[in-house]
Image (tube, grey):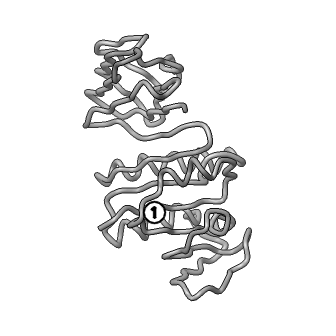
Amino acid sequence: MGRCVIFGGAEISDYNKIKSYLRDDDFLVFCDSGLKHMEALGLTADLIIGDFDSHENPMLPVETIVLPCEKDDTDTVFAVKEALKRGFEDFLLLGTIGGRIDHTLGNLSILLMLDTAGKHGIMVDDHSEMEIISDKPAYVEDRYSYFSLLNISGTAEGIVIENAKYLLDGGGITCDYQYGVSNEVIKGKTAKITVAEGRLLLVKDF
């Protein structure tokens, strides 16, 4: 099974960058106002989901799930849950960062939800690429200008950072003291990050 790509309604200014992430076998899901990105990217949806409070239902000959406006899940969260039901293991989330801070923070928690389910997810916006580090090492190539480690889920302990300007050997990062911002990979190296306990959000800046 291919990867599930979910488009939200946040602004995307660099469509060429977004195109570079897409694959021919991606399953494309557009959520409500995320439909504005479909034409801009010249794509065809495999699934459309929304309550259509911010974009009219295009009534395309494509599978469409119409949601009520009053519900617990945002359109994007519902889309992720639907994709999990369909057996997808790998996720790319686009158009999900920026604009309303409540939607941005809510969408970041989707990465935690996917990690809890044992699935892999990354989120990309105009400036960065984001993923969760938990029980597997993460790597950052020196093509990224900076990388940051942020705690968004509680306590993270036993953090090891190798091949970076600022090293760490068994440290901890808490939600109320985020000192893991703006690290740099040593040129010619690949940084390696591991977390013994807990989870971290890895942000890789372009």
In which quadrant is the N terminus drawn?
A: bottom left
Q: Is residue 20 visible in the rendered structure shown here?
A: yes
Residue at position x 73%, y 77% in the image: 56
Residue at position x 60%, y 50% in the image: 16
Against 172, residue 150 (above or below) is below
Q: How many marks?
A: 1
Residue at position x 43%, y 69% in the image: 27
Q: Is residue 177 visible in the rendered structure shown here?
A: no
Quadrant hosting residue 149: top left
- 69 vs 141, left or right, is right
Foreground residue among 12 and 8:
12
Q: Position of residue 181 (x, y in %)?
A: 52, 21
What amino acid type should be assigned to the residue bearing mark 1? Answer: Val
Foreground residue among 51 and 26:
26
- 167 vs 63, left or right, is left
Foreground residue among 144 and 103:
144
Residue at position x 58%, y 66% in the image: 75
The residue that disc 1 covers is 80
Against 114, residue 148 (above or below) is above
Q: Position of residue 73 (x, y in %)?
A: 55, 64
Element on which disc 1 rests: helix
Q: Position of residue 54 (x, y in %)?
A: 74, 68
In which quadrant is the C terminus drawn?
A: top right
- 58 vs 180, left or right, is right
